[in-house]
Amino acid sequence: MRVAVGADHAGFGLKQDLADLLRRLGHEVVDLGTYSTDPVDYPDIALAVARAVAGGEADRGLIVCGTGIGSSIVANKVRGVRAALCHDTFSARATREHNDSNVLCLGARVVGPGLAADILTTWLGAAFEAGGRHERRVRRIAAIELEESRPGQGRCGGTPQESSPASRPGRT
Ligand code: RB5
């Protein structure tokens, strides 16, 4: 897989470790910075990684900042990006299976390198459960992105029930 990676100064060290891990696992790494611990603004790095994924230059993205929160906020503003902030392996697997997330965000001040490596390998190894309710919901995300990007149309039509006709109690 071609993986675009990026980090701010807070995530730099962990990004280096995880980029090495990706290469050892046979992935191609596109390193979009930062390249030192000199302070940089996470929005610029997160945007570069998100655009690489949205534009098809990378299959997946990995962004590391101090908490992972700022990066995930930025990445999710790019159409077509579904960025997931994960600090446990359950969420990492679930967000691939349910949300088809294409960018993983990590907080280097939250998780240690061992757990971060497990989260990344779990996320890369899990597959989207296509063809059912999860695909319908991901399509709905895409429709919402489109709707919200239209000037003067800052609302999405339909109630949750109307937009998800197959939703029933007991379904997950
Ligand atoms: C940098 O100090 C820090 O704010 C950043 O790495 C990140 O945690 C933002 O969400």
Image: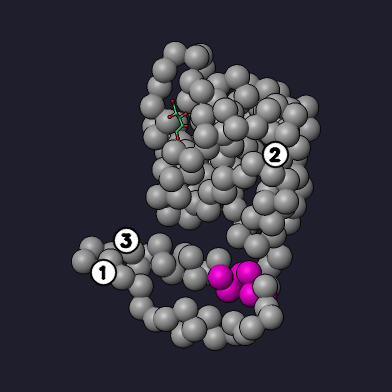
Residue 86 sits inside the magenta stretch: no
> Residue at point 54% right, 86% down?
165
> Residue at point 78% right, 27% down?
24
**Residue 96 visible here:** no
Assign the magenta stretch its main secondary structure.
helix
Q: Nearer the viewer, mark 2 or mark 3?
A: 2
Callout 2: helix, strand or loop?
helix
Is residue 119 shown above or below 11? below
Q: Quadrant of ligand 1?
A: top left
Lower sequence index among marks 2 and 3: 2
Callout 3: helix, strand or loop?
helix
Which residue in the structure is indicated by mark 2? 120
Dot 2 crowding, Cα within 10 Å, few <14, some 14–19, many 20+: many
Bounds of the magenta span?
A: 132-137
Residue 84, position in %: x, y? 57, 48
Is residue 62 shown above or below 130? above
